[in-house]
Amino acid sequence: MTKDIKKLIDFLIYSEKLKTEKRHAHKSDDSYESAAEHSWRLSLLLMLVAPRLKRKINLEKALKMATIHDIVEIDAEDVLVLEHIDNKLKKDYKDEQEKIAIENVKKMLGSDGSEIYNLWYEYLETESYESKILHVLNMIEGQSQFLSEGVKKFTNEEQDSVSKLIAKTQELSKIDPFLEELYLSCGELFRKRTKPID
């Protein structure tokens, strides 16, 4: 076995752990969703939305970005967006852990890791058209997972974070008329599925 093939096999074994990284949402069978399942459905959503966007997107690049955007959660773990949307300390800590994790990915893959590393940072910085579209779709996909659950109850503090998440997603979705319409529809369903704990 060549070093190159061993490196790829080792990374394939490492990346399997994303299938075991549980997110905070339940699937329709009441089991927890994994980060890998989220990435898969985000990629599917991207494929379906891309032809409807007003401006052409580099779909190959965006799909690669969708595939790897949460690879860092193998080491850094998933952090519920409601926990850091309004908490700079938690957000900064999350970002720091993810940056350490992407360095590990790059080191593991050597020169093969450059594309993953660069795409991940492009997603993080949210300056390119593809990364902006993907951020909106990532938020829509995450929130739409709650549509597979029953009514979700939140504490008053969590409800405040939910409101901020909805407002942020609405604002970001304005990048494209179709995304705005899609989120208005999904967001309305999401709001109906959330309510404060009595």
Image: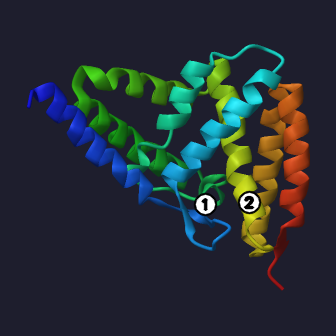
Expressed as whole percent of the image width and height from the top left, the position of residue 151 reads 81, 73
| Residue 71 x %, y % | 42, 42
Q: Nearer the viewer, residue 139 or 31?
A: 31
For label 1, the residue is 83
Q: Are marks 2 and 1 in contact (CB under 8 Å)?
A: yes
In the image, 146: left or right of 6? Answer: right
x%, y% of residue 123? 55, 29
The first of marks 2 and 1 along the sequence is 1
SS assignment at label 2? helix
| CA distance for labels 2 and 1 | 8 Å
Rendering coords of residue 147 (x, y %): 78, 61
Residue at 58% across / 59% down in the picture? 80
**In this rendering, would 32 be left or right of 143?**
left
In depth, the one of 100 and 69 nearer the eye is 69
Q: Residue at x 85, y 43 (%)?
A: 183
Q: Measured along the vertical axis of the image, is residue 106 above or below residue 21?
A: above
In this figure, which residue is indicated by the disc labeled 2? 161
Q: In this orientation, which residue lies closer to the viewer: 47 or 21?
A: 47
User: Callout 1, which amino acid?
Assistant: Glu
Quadrant of the image occupied by residue 173: top right
Q: Circle 2: is it few (<14), some (14-19), or many (20+) Cα within 10 Å? A: many
Q: Is residue 176 above or below residue 86?
A: above
Q: Amino acid at mark 2?
A: Ser
Which residue occupies the extreme bottom position in the image?
A: 198
Left or right: residue 42 versus residue 118 is right
Please give left or right for residue 172 compared with residue 141 in the image. right
- Residue at 56%, 34% in the rendered image: 66
